[in-house]
Amino acid sequence: MTGAPQRIVIIGAGQAGGQAAYSLRLGGFEGEIILVGDEPAPPYQRPPLSKAYFKGELEADRLFLKPLDYYAENRIELVTGDAATAIDLPGRQVALASGRQLGWDRLVIATGARPRKLALQGADLDGIGELRTLADVDRLKKLGVPGARMVVIGAGYIGLEAAAVGQQLGLKVTVLEAMPQVLSRVAGPEIGAFYTHIHREAGTDVRLGARIEAFEGVGAVTGVKLADGEVIPADFVLVGVGVLPNMELALEAGLMCGNGVVVDAAMRTSHPDVYAIGDVAWRPLVHYGREGRLESVHNAIEGGKLAAADILGKTPPPLEAPWFWSDQFDLKLQTAGLWTGADERVVRGEPASRAFAVFYLKEGHLIAVDAVNSAPEYIVGKKLVAAKAKVAPGELVDKSISMKDIGARASN
Ligand SMILES: Cc1cc2nc3c(=O)[nH]c(=O)nc-3n(C[C@H](O)[C@H](O)[C@H](O)COP(=O)(O)OP(=O)(O)OC[C@H]3O[C@@H](n4cnc5c(N)ncnc54)[C@H](O)[C@@H]3O)c2cc1C
């Protein structure tokens, strides 16, 4: 590694890149910080894009992580609308699409992820889109007039959140999910069954195990054709089938990549002066003894803070268990931990009451919790997940025992 850095370049001005810049300044870095983003907007939060912003309840500038003045006041050069096109590791340069060349002493890759596309006939018709950026949702908002038929492909968080807003905006909504359960990648079957019921009750046609064959239409989409020949009429289609990490720059530069840019616990890549953070990073998941790529605000913020601390030679912030949330209708789902690998699930409360939690255990230890409108279950559950605490399923299920008491009795 070289000596004290004078100039730090951050590629990707999103949640993670923005956080890295803020943490560097807050941490006392006095040198140059250049934050390069290919979108026209300054760093902004994406969660409201499929929630309040899609619904029309928030103005775009309320999404910005910091007011525009912040960047000049804190001597962070914010470059917007310009993409990094190549990283030269030996020469310590980044090339931008505008032709500018930026030298760096430390480089942070925070390029996020992009929506996966469906390689189906008609996929390039007008009216078929994704939901990742402000521009995406502004396009959707124009199409989402009351009575319009919206078909959502993929019942993950983003698809279901958009479907819920669609219902609230007076659209006719169909959700097509290939798996037998909604939210199958992120939650267990109880949560899946609950949300299927909630969306159906609200009037959405939720199809599970759906096989999509093609998009129909001339110029613009008019329908989605299923494998059994049925055509679901559509005025527009939202495709929400997961994301791919934007790791091409790193890969071409020769950095070690798998399903993301491979980093160590300090978010350092295979080059000691280059970091990768946020959705693009394949990082150690210390609470689970394995590695993985997370897609969440918590992960982006934590990565930004970890990289900044390492660059500045400071003590890293304490690591939290991964956490996430999703707002659909009047329901707040809060998740702590990762449920994959659970060998036991315990439901606390009645799903019919619209307030309940599912605890996921592995060999008696709590590894994750999904809490629907249940703050104590989430708050205490999150602490127990982080501590890998051993909890008695019989206590978890018993609502007469408070979460506070369950937390106090849990052992490691
Ligand atoms: C609609 C939606 C709803 C979500 N809801 C939630 C939620 O409720 N809770 C939660 O925890 N998480 C949620 N997330 C996930 C969360 O927003 C992401 O995990 C987070 O934004 C990741 O931060 P990031 O900085 O890694 O990526 P991003 O925020 O995507 O930022 C990356 C930026 O880098 C830019 N970029 C890429 N390549 C280049 C290049 N070559 N040069 C310059 N710039 C480049 C991208 O255009 C982008 O602006 C949601 C995401 C979406 C899309």
Image: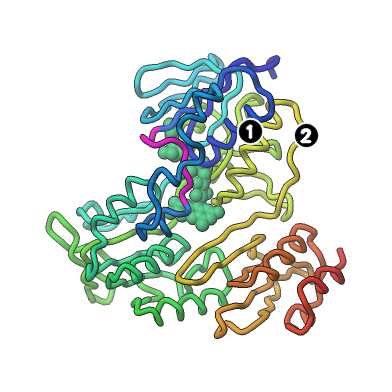
Instruction: State the residue at coordinates (64%, 24%).
Output: 273
Q: Quadrant of residue 408?
A: bottom right
Counting residues from the start of the chain, the first of labels 2 and 1 encountered is 1
Q: Does any portion of residue 112 appear in the rendered image?
A: no
**Viewer-closest of 215 and 252:** 215
Q: In the drawing, does residue 407 fall left or right of residue 219? A: right
For marks 2 and 1, give the CA distance.
13 Å
Residue 319 numbered mark, or none: none
Disc 1 residue type?
Ser
Q: Which residue is mark 1?
A: 23
x and y, in percent, of residue 317 in the image: 73, 40
Quadrant in which the N terminus is drawn: top right
Q: Is mark 1 within 8 Å of ligand 1?
A: no
Instruction: State the residue at coordinates (24%, 61%).
Output: 236
Q: Please state the extent of the stretch shown in magenta in the rendering.
A: 38-46
Quadrant in which the C terminus is drawn: bottom right
Estimate how packed mark 2 is, as few (under 14), some (14 to 19) or many (20 or more) residues with alpha carbons within 10 Å.
Answer: few
Secondary structure at numbered mark 2: loop
Disc 2 residue type?
Thr
Secondary structure at numbered mark 1: helix
Q: Quadrant of residue 349?
A: bottom right
Q: Which residue is mark 2?
A: 315
x and y, in percent, of residue 38 in the image: 39, 33
